[in-house]
Image (cartoon, rainbow, N blue to C red):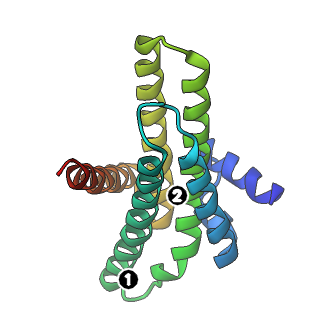
Amino acid sequence: MAFNLKIFLNILLFSSGPQDLPASANLLKIIIILNIIVGLMAVDPNIDITVNIFFALIYILVTLVFIRVCLNLKDKTNQGSSYSSRYLQVCIGTLGVHALIALFTNLVTLMSGSSTESLVIAFLIISLYAWFVNGHIFKNAFDTTMTIGLGFSLLHSMICVIFMMLFIQVLAS
């Protein structure tokens, strides 16, 4: 696991990609559990812990489906390559990086106290960085440019937000 953590840190530094991770269903299960555990960390006492868990589950499910659909579409456009075989590695990379960034964000939030202005600035910087890291992962996953990878990252984020907003609407009604 320490070796995998080093790969995740290298992905965060843009020096490795998801192709450097093992294609292991067991590692993916561990990463999913880590995402749920990070989701349990209630940073805002006004938000119920179950809502945080549902947000984590929505993010996980949307990510797994998004990557599957995108890799299958890439397979259909490139008859000679099998991009769907990268599924486990891309899921592990995306969800693993998300767990690390979410953990870091939670720690920054807890350490900042009540300073909302600095917290908003930190959150925006971390979000922008996460967008670039996911763009780097998608760039490597789809053998494309960073611009296209950032586009995939933005689309992924938008779909996650849409499903989370739908969940909030269901709770409000």
The x and y percentages for residue 53 are 48, 53
- Numbered disc 2: secondary structure: helix
- For image coordinates 59% across by 47% down, the residue present is 38
Question: Splitting the image into 4 quarters, where does residue 54 fall?
Answer: bottom left
Vertical placement of 51 versus 103: above or below?
below
Residue found farthest to the right:
2
List x then y, in percent, for residue 16: 64, 54
Direction from residue 153 to residue 134 in the image, left or right: right
Residue occupied by mark 1: 75
User: Marks 1/2: CA distance?
Assistant: 20 Å
SS category of the residue bearing label 1: helix
Q: How many marks?
A: 2
Q: Does 59 appear above or below 110?
A: below
Nearer to us of marks 1 and 2 is: 2
* Marker disc for residue 62: none
- Residue 24 visible? The answer is no
Dot 1 surroundings within 10 Å: few (below 14), some, or many (20 or more)? some
Locate residue 17, reporting x and y percent.
Answer: 60, 58
Could you classify mark 2 by the number of other residues whose Cα lies within 10 Å: few (under 14), some (14-19), or many (20 or more)? Answer: many
Horizontal side of residue 132 vs 23, given as left or right: left
Name the residue that disc number 2 marks: 94
Q: Amino acid at mark 1?
A: Asp
Q: Residue at image x 57%, y 74%?
A: 88
Considering depth in this image, is 26 or 149 the residue closer to the camera? Answer: 26
Q: Amino acid at mark 2?
A: Thr
